[in-house]
Image (tube, rainbow, N blue to C red):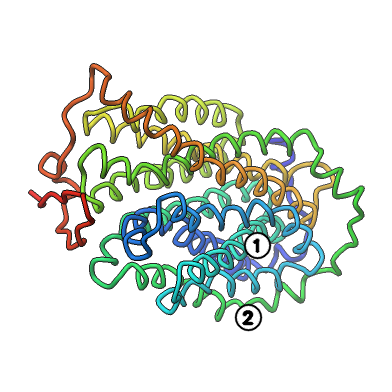
């Protein structure tokens, strides 16, 4: 694989050096916009539950249904991109991701869910089309850096939304907070149309991929291995990211803002892991040791996020899990690009399969994780190294005034 990545592509498009950076910029912005949108409701679920008088399982549809769209549209989305081309597909994705800007005008929970589902359709198209664009406009070895950058942008978006959502909700409302996170998609939709001309001009006629050609891509052993890796890591990541804010608030005694800030360490740690893996693999070539290290760190860090009772150990476990869940991504995303006979259109199919299966695991993760919450909470209380609940006074590093209204039967502690 290192040999494949060392080979230069003999493609006249690569001489358009400056426009290559435009393509890279849009790919990074697309993943940043996706990160801002995908988990933004997670720290706001208590407020949404209050406003709509719904239970937690129903409220979790705001996260699980967009992921279900990604799971259901991954492979079809790859086929759509291969059929209609990258320029049109990216444009559609930008407009769909911008739909939640209408959140303040959603008059019911069903309308809010519909906006989130539309955004989910945009997320899958934006996530998949970035791969063929990068493969088409960058040399194979440079894709390691680009894949590290786009995944870093995704994590910056996730960290920013989780960290700032409660604060924006305090300053504005949770509806306007979700709308603010969609503004970047509006900008991307407006900018992509006039700036994507070279993509249209350089693109060849989309090939007519037969069912047999599609099956040959999705049954490739390397693609199936990457599917397994991505599914395992992202399933755990989605479950913990969705559940931890509520767990920290209800079991550990943190405020909503402090719980969100602690959870945001997961994607924040991932940012540095992705940049390290992307640039290091560019210098030394892709290595399976990045993937092995990722698995070990994820297994070590995951249970500690909810079993430890000491705040310092919790932070350490979150950081270890964040690094482990992201260190492998630049390598696994670049590996299909170097497969023999791979084209941008076939890559859209391969990435579509990876998105579908891994997102299906992410959809199921909150379901089984919530049902294990009672057991894990009881276990964490019983463990000998557990300390008393962590109130705001013991968590001043993330302290911030809270104007969140009280919910019936819940004691909201004053910030210390």
- Viewer-proximal residue, 345 or 99? 99
Query: Residue at coordinates 21% horizontally, 29% vertically from top-left?
Result: 310
Establish if 281 lies above or below 115.
Answer: above
Picture residue at 62% right of the left edge, 65% below the top: 20
At 73% from the left and 66% from the top, the residue drawn is 13
**Helix, strand, or loop for circle 1?**
helix
Furthest residue toward top: 384
Specify whether 320 is left or right of 172.
right
Compared with residue 390, is residue 257 higher up or lower down, i.e. above or below? Answer: below
Disc number for residue 229: none
Q: Nearer the viewer, residue 249 or 34?
A: 249
Residue 282 in view: no
The residue that disc 2 covers is 193
Is residue 212 visible in this depiction of the protein? yes
Quadrant that contains the N terminus: top right
Q: From the viewer's side, name the closer residue of 53 and 344.
A: 53
Hey, which quadrant is residue 229 in on the image? top right
Whether residue 280 is situated above or below residue 40 in the rendered picture: above
CA–CA distance in space, label 1 to label 2: 16 Å
Residue positioned most to the left: 416
Point out residue 238 in the picture as x, y percentages from the top left corner.
Answer: 48, 44
Residue depth check, mark 1 versus mark 2: number of the one nearer the observer = 1
Left or right for 106, reference 194: left
Count of picture labels: 2
Q: Earlier in the sequence, mark 1 or mark 2?
A: 1
Q: Residues within 10 Å of mark 1 (few under 14, many from 20)?
A: many
Instruction: Look at the picture and state if 187 lies above or below 412.
Output: below
- Residue position for label 1: 125
Residue 191: quadrant of the picture: bottom right
- Residue at (32% x, 40% y) in the render: 247
Q: Position of residue 296 (x, y in %)?
A: 49, 24
């Amino acid at each position: 694989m290192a040999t494949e990545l060392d080979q230069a592509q003999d493609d006249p498009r690569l001489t358009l050096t400056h426009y290559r950076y435009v393509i890279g910029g849009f790919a990074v912005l697309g993943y940043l916009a996706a990160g801002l949108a995908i988990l933004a409701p997670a720290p706001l679920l208590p407020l949404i539950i209050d406003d709509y008088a719904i239970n937690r399982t129903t409220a979790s549809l705001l996260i699980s249904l967009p992921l279900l769209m990604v799971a259901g549209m991954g492979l079809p989305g790859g086929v759509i991109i291969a059929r209609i081309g990258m320029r049109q597909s990216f444009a559609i994705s930008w407009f769909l991701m911008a739909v939640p800007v209408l959140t303040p005008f959603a008059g019911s929970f069903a309308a809010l869910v519909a906006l989130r589902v539309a955004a989910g359709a945009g997320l899958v198209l934006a996530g998949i089309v970035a791969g063929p664009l990068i493969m088409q406009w960058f040399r194979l070895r440079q894709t390691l850096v680009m894949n590290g950058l786009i995944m870093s942008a995704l994590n910056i978006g996730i960290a920013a939304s989780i960290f700032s959502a409660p604060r924006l909700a305090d300053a504005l409302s949770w509806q306007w907070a979700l709308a603010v996170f969609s503004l970047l998609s509006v900008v991307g939709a407006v900018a992509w149309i006039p700036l994507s001309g070279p993509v249209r001009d350089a693109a060849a006629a989309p090939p007519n991929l037969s069912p047999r050609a599609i099956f040959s891509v999705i049954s490739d052993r390397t693609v199936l291995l990457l599917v397994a890796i991505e599914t395992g890591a992202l399933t755990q990541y989605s479950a913990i990211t969705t559940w931890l804010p509520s767990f920290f608030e209800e079991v550990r005694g943190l405020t909503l803002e402090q719980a969100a800030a602690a959870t945001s360490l997961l994607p924040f740690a991932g940012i540095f892991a992705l940049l390290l893996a992307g640039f290091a693999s560019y210098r030394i070539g892709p290595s399976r040791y990045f993937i092995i290290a990722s698995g070990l760190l994820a297994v070590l860090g995951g249970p500690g996020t909810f079993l430890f009772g000491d705040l310092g150990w919790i932070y350490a476990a979150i950081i270890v899990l964040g690094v482990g869940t992201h260190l492998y991504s630049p390598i696994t995303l670049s590996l299909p690009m170097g497969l023999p006979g791979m084209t941008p259109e076939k890559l859209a199919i391969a990435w579509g399969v990876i998105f579908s299966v891994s997102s299906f695991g992410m959809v199921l993760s909150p379901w089984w994780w919530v049902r294990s919450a009672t057991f894990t909470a009881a276990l964490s209380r019983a463990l000998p190294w557990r300390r008393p609940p962590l109130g705001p006074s013991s968590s001043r590093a993330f302290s911030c005034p809270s104007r969140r209204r009280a919910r019936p039967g819940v004691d909201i502690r004053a910030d210390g």
